[in-house]
Image: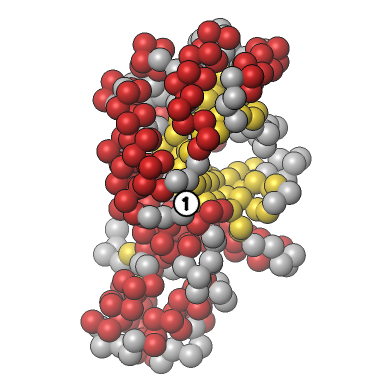
Amino acid sequence: MSNKHSIYGLTKEKLTDWLVENGQKKFRAKQVWDWLYKKRVTTFDAMKNLNKDCIALLEANFYIETLTEEIKQESKDGTIKFLFKLEDGNLIETVLMRFSYGLSVCVTTQVGCNIGCTFCASGLLTKNRDLSGGEIVEQIMKVQHHLDAQKKDERVSHIVIMGIGEPFDNYNNTMDFLRVVNDQEGLSIGARHITLSTSGLAHKIREFADENFQVNLAVSLHAPNDELRTSIMKINKAFPIAKLMDAVDYYLEKTNRRITFEYILLKGVNDHKEEALQLAKLLKNKRHLSYVNLIPYNPVEEHNQYDRSEKDAIVGFYETLLNAGINCGVRVEQGSDIDAACGQLRSKQMKKAQ
């Protein structure tokens, strides 16, 4: 592999510092930034207002494109799932979803995942490595380039960091990603249009609270008590619910921003009225800044011990929370006619290659 890196991994400040350190004028950084994120070129020699020395310097040290599109699945509802191959041959998934409020992209932060949730397709293959900040940013750029090619003047307006991997287990690269896509002189995707999902790394929730980002935070809870949560999410052994909720309280006090709690409904496992009442009790003191996102389960072939909850159970769970004063809703599904569950497409391709 080359010693070159993705230029998308540099925040504007880091790009400016690097260019100045390598003998270029400070204003060159803004020019390069404009070419990358406003004009969205994919080669350095397309940056027409740069001199030859600057272009040669960039070409010697950076890539613009490192991801190769392997598969593109399109759903009837407009959802598109991309399978990208990284420079080292690893595979990742990125998803474009269409909503009434705009176009949202779900990005991946790691190759595989070590969190080990027993219902999740992403964790079928353990973590191989973290993605670089550039590889995370490039997922957005690949989708935007796809949209540009359609010539419909569409742009990515929202981001969810909910793809393969645990973002807080790749903290620094995820923070650089946020700074790049949020930059007002680049893609300018508003922080409040970005949602980061964590399985509950309590110490990182505290660290994130101190960042003073306006990014939305979602916590994958999926069970209201330690025994049940540990049985489906091994991360609960390291960060049991009490420790997690202490970190959540710190986040709420520090930011005064609402947290979403994600709750996948598994038939006969965590979808009873008893669990709904326990969940309502757990969130009672946080309900003014809490929202529960109930998620119908997408069955995964390898996790055949789980089934999707019956409609009556979903409605009953929702109504129990609502009656207890908990803000909640049931997630609208996207791309149900393609490999909907995160990690499924990658997992299938890995199996084919074996």
Task: Tell whether 239 sits left or right of 265.
Answer: left
Residue 62 or 238: which is nearer the viewer? 238
Task: Locate the N terminus by quadrant.
Answer: bottom left
Q: Position of residue 163 (x, y in %)?
A: 48, 41
Residue at 48% from the left image edge and 90% from the top image edge: 49
Residue bearing the label numbered 1: 215
Whether residue 195 is visible to the viewer of this picture, yes or no, is: yes
Residue 158 or 46: which is nearer the viewer? 158
Say which quarter of the image contains residue 240. Answer: top left
Helix or strand or loop: what does disc 1 sit on?
loop
Image position of 212 with respect to 90: above or below: below
Task: Locate the C terminus by quadrant.
Answer: top left
Residue 306 or 265: which is nearer the viewer? 265
Residue at 37% from the left image edge and 52% from the top image edge: 174
Residue at 36% from the left image edge and 29% from the top image edge: 245
Q: Position of residue 138 (x, y in %)?
A: 47, 59
Task: Tell whether 65 sits left or right of 333.
Answer: left
